[in-house]
Image (cartoon, rainbow, N blue to C red):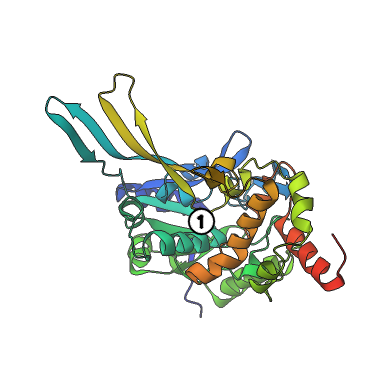
Amino acid sequence: MSDALLLPKTRLDDLIGRLLDEGFRVVGPVVQNGAVVFDEVRSASDLARGLRDRQEAGQYRLEAGGAAEIFGVVNGPGSLKPFFFAPREPLLEMRREKKGFRVREIEPEAPPVAVLGARPCDLAALAIQDRLFLDDRFRDAHYAARREGALLIAVECTRPASTCFCASMGTGPAVSRGYDLALTELDDVFAVRIGSPRGEALIASLRLDAAGEDVAAEARRRVAACAASMSRRLDTADLPHLLYEEVENPRWSDVARRCLSCTNCTMVCPTCFCHAVVDVTEISGAVSRRERRWDSCFSREHAHIHGKNFRPQIRHRYRQWLTHKLAAWIDQFGTSGCVGCGRCIAWCPAAIDLTEEVAAIRAGRRTGVET
């Protein structure tokens, strides 16, 4: 027999209701402005059911899927990152008083959040963010306050988007760690696996039946079929050495002619962590706030220091991004900064595909021909 449990799709509202009763803010994949993003849900009817996504380089469209399919959309532009590493948040407030200034550290708002429908690649990305914000020498209090109360319910992928290459990165489509519960969607039921004591306590209240081995085997078969059907691959065998070796490869200039330096790829990336700290003063001059905001290594200002910009051209910035993501990140943090979610491919208006760029750099090195 399998250790999996059976959750009928008709009882998904019971799970959501239980989370709400326990005080969680529940977020899941919902439709907004023609895309699927993570946002608040109160019932299963809020989810992006009956839909699928069609993604290619520079393209994203929603289309009809199976009427009974609840998690048919693989992903959209939004990941889990904004729920823990806020796009914009105040850090300090400085207020002028009669005899000087009063400085107050602003505590983050951190209501407990339960994520329903987290994909394996996004869980892998969250583990990378944890490495950056929790496990380094300087623990980020704002990130920690939001992260510690989170409950994560994963959904394993049974179909890939054409932009997915998580199998190459070892981050999906199966989920192996970092979850409280893992769901695999079948025709009328979910196969449920428990990943933590919190998940076990939550699911125990629903009194679910055990899944037979046939159900568990079908769940594994569908996830394996998803991995086998991925059309994109990234050869990581000689990374990071390849990118360090090819710092002057002409492909950097080629991609720079197409890149708009718009920052879309870094904004949708679930692991990018560049940010700026700025001071904002009210027009009266009485109050000033220090804010942290997402930034991007693709913005020209990001590399500007006193008297000089050390990445003045787009080719410098694209090289920095790709080399950091796939090479220097490994040296810094012991892991690649890419989880193969494919968002940077789908949401690039110039349809630049990092898997193609790495392959072209590799081919140019081996043949000695400019690409």
User: Does residue 42 appear in this view?
Assistant: no
Secondary structure of the residue carrying tag 1 is strand
Residue annotated with mark 1:
118
Three-letter amino acid code at the position of disc 1? Ala
Q: Residue at x 52, y 56 (%)?
A: 271
Height in image: 114 above or below 225? above
Q: Quadrant of residue 337?
A: bottom right
Taking depth in this image into account, of 368 and 156 the one nearest to the observer is 368
Taking depth in this image into account, of 290 and 192 the one nearest to the observer is 290
The C terminus lies in quadrant: bottom right
Residue 289: image x %, image y %? Answer: 31, 34
Residue 104: image x %, image y %? Answer: 21, 39
Q: Residue at x 73, y 54 (%)?
A: 353
Q: Residue at x 58, y 71 (%)?
A: 215
In the rendered view, does 179 fall on the left or right side of 106?
right
In the rendered view, does 147 fall on the left or right side of 259?
left
Q: Residue at x 70, y 41 (%)?
A: 260
User: Does residue 108 appear in this view?
Assistant: yes
